[in-house]
Amino acid sequence: MANTERLAVLQQVTLAKESVSKQRVRPSLDDDARDLLNDLFEQLNDLQNELILADLSEAIRSLQKQSGQLQKVAVKLKSGTKALAQLSKEIQEVAEVVGVLADIAAKASSAGLA
């Protein structure tokens, strides 16, 4: 996997974490939304760590799993308030680029490039 793709995804995950962090401290959030955002923040934090530290074969499997999990959370957020629906779009984009990165890494690994 090329380092530039990893860094681009890492940047997007970091920005999403910042957005989630801002949203999860809003006083108007109900407990369910706050719990969902706290879980999402933890998922993004784990993903960020995975992008930074993980070994390639483990990272591919984890990235695929995390992409799916983020997509599920994005669907849940979509039905929330306007602010949460907007956050859903951002999380969906992160899920998509993480999925693409996992595909690139898997292809590079199977071709002996990584």
Image (cartoon, rainbow, N blue to C red):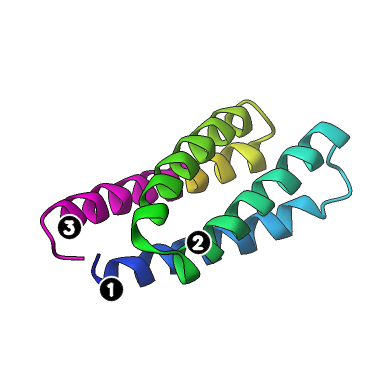
Residue 90, given in percent of the width and then of the height, sits at 49, 48
Q: Earlier in the sequence, mark 3 or mark 2?
A: 2
Residue 93 shows in this picture: no
- The numbered mark at residue 50 is 2
Range shown magenta: 92-114
For the stretch drawn in magenta, the main secondary structure is: helix
Distance CA(mark 3)–CA(mark 1): 14 Å
Residue drawn at (49%, 70%) of the image: 53
Nearest the eye: 22 or 51? 51
- Element type where label 1 sits in the image: helix
**Residue type of the residue flagged with mark 1:** Thr
**Left or right for 81, reference 5:** right
Residue tagged 1: 4
Residue 113: within the magenta?
A: yes
In the picture as drawn, the residue positioned furthest to the left comes out as 111
Q: Which of the two marks, 1 or 2, is nearer to us in this view?
A: 2
**Left or right for 66, reference 40:** left
Residue drawn at (53%, 63%) of the image: 48
Nearest the eye: 92 or 44? 44
Image quadrant containing the N terminus = bottom left
Residue 101, given in percent of the width and then of the height, sits at 30, 54
Residue drawn at (63%, 64%) of the image: 18
- Element type where label 2 sits in the image: helix
Residue 61: within the magenta?
A: no
- The numbered mark at residue 79 is none
**Residue type of the residue flagged with mark 3:** Ala
Nearest the eye: 69 or 96? 69
Q: Residues within 10 Å of mark 2 (few under 14, many from 20)?
A: some
Q: Earlier in the sequence, mark 3 or mark 1?
A: 1
Vertical comparison of 33 with 104: above or below: above
Residue tagged 3: 108
